[in-house]
Image (cartoon, rainbow, N blue to C red):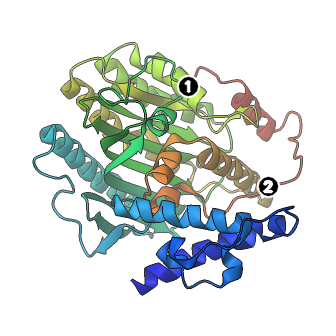
Amino acid sequence: RVARMVRLTHLAMVAVSALAGADAFAATHVGALPRAALPRALRSAPPAWRTGRASNCAINMVEATEKKEAEGLGFNSHQAVNAAPDTLCLDGTANTEMRAKFEKMCREAQDKICKAVEEVDGKGKFHQDSWIRENGGGGISRVLTNGNVFEKAGCSLSVVYGSMPQEALAAANDRLKFGATDRGKGYKPGEKVPFFACGLSSVMHPRNPHCPTMHFNYRYFETEGGMWWFGGGTDITPAYLDLDDMKHFHGSYKEVADKHDPEFYPKFKAWADEYFYIKHRDETRGLGGIFFDDLNDRDPDTIFAFSKECCNNVPSAYLPIIEKNKDKEYTVKQKEWQQMRRGRYVEFNLVYDRGTIFGLKTGGRIESILMSMPEGARWEYDHKVEPGSPEADIMDAFKNPREWL
């Protein structure tokens, strides 16, 4: 209780500090609020804290945090455990069978992918953190750092029970191109939508600039209103263009997709090019792969089988490229270029990525949400690539998405 009070009081102090300058220039101030009208965490604060616009901001921040925690959400609602239970899903809830099956698939894929990455790295080992939430759900995060091959690699499983405003759920999948799902179906306007989500996310950041970064995420959503859908994809972000590597990566996912529907690869490849677009830079984050969302146009077991095969395809699609390039020599300039491209990676993830936004809106575990961030990134003012250089070659691919097969 004391720790919580200290944390909330600190939050209020941050708000006061941020707005104190503006309050000094305000023409009028609201009167000091009575102590009894304040959230508990602010009642022992000095009177000056309870004056003007800063006090209103602080109160709103604290009350929002208290409301989140009362709902079982919030960034500090996670309880660390030595080992995750056999399942993080709750019994007796809607469609328990698919929820449990998807969680099992994610756990098995996490084991398989982490083992394969450790074998390629030869030194680094994944550190595991497990946690649970009082109202159900939890997660398992694994992170490898300071490896021979990988500067940082993460692979995180999460199971979430919560509720979100309908507009927040809708914002999680704007720019839909291939169909839409009414995520708030069954609820009146303004009502929060209870939901279940399970997913496995991963990002791998290698040391060598000739080795591309790789990201994947596969997820399953349900609302208590009866709506369900699958989403996910795997994409690649190189700093230097190797046509053979791109043919291998994209060809690997086309082969998987074609087994399930010959329209999947061209549709989901185009969706990846659209989704991983950095609007303020007018370029893509990387060189794509596949991406899909709101997939519920056929039997759920059929889509589950597709998601499972895509997820388990990660090692064969990605790791041969790492094996091929991990021992290549590189210059300081090439390392700096890699770090500049990782700066673009950070920009996309913090501004546009739906998974990051969803995690922040639902009070997810912050270390897991930001697991995708590289250890190092670089921003050079008004940087221009040299015409005819390898950097210019891949910049053209970022500006003008290509077909690789």
Name the residue nearer the viewer: 128 or 98: 98
Cα separation between marks 2 and 1: 28 Å
Hey, which quadrant is residue 307 in on the image?
top left
Using the image as rendered, state which of residue 282 and residue 326 is in the foreground.
282
Residue kind at label 1, given as amino acid type: Arg
Q: Which dot marks residue 379?
A: 2
Q: Is residue 189 left or right of residue 225?
A: right
Callout 1 crowding tier (Cα within 10 Å): few <14, some 14–19, many ≥20? few
What residue sits 59% from the left and 72% below the top? 11
Callout 2 environment at 10 Å: few (<14), some (14 to 19), or many (20+)?
Answer: some
Task: Tell me if residue 121 can be seen.
Answer: no
Q: What residue is drawn where x is 33% and y is 54%?
A: 157
Q: Judging from the image, what secondary structure is the residue with disc 1 in? A: loop
The picture places residue 101, in percent across and down from the top left corner, at 17, 42
Q: Is 337 on the left-hand or right-hand side of 64?
A: right
Give SS at disc 2.
loop
> At x 73% / y 67%, what residue is drawn?
52
Residue under the point 59% across and 20% down: 403
**Disc marking residue 175:** 1
42 up-or-down from 356: above or below? below
Quadrant of the drawing holding the N terminus: bottom left
- Front in this rendered view, residue 50 or 215: 50
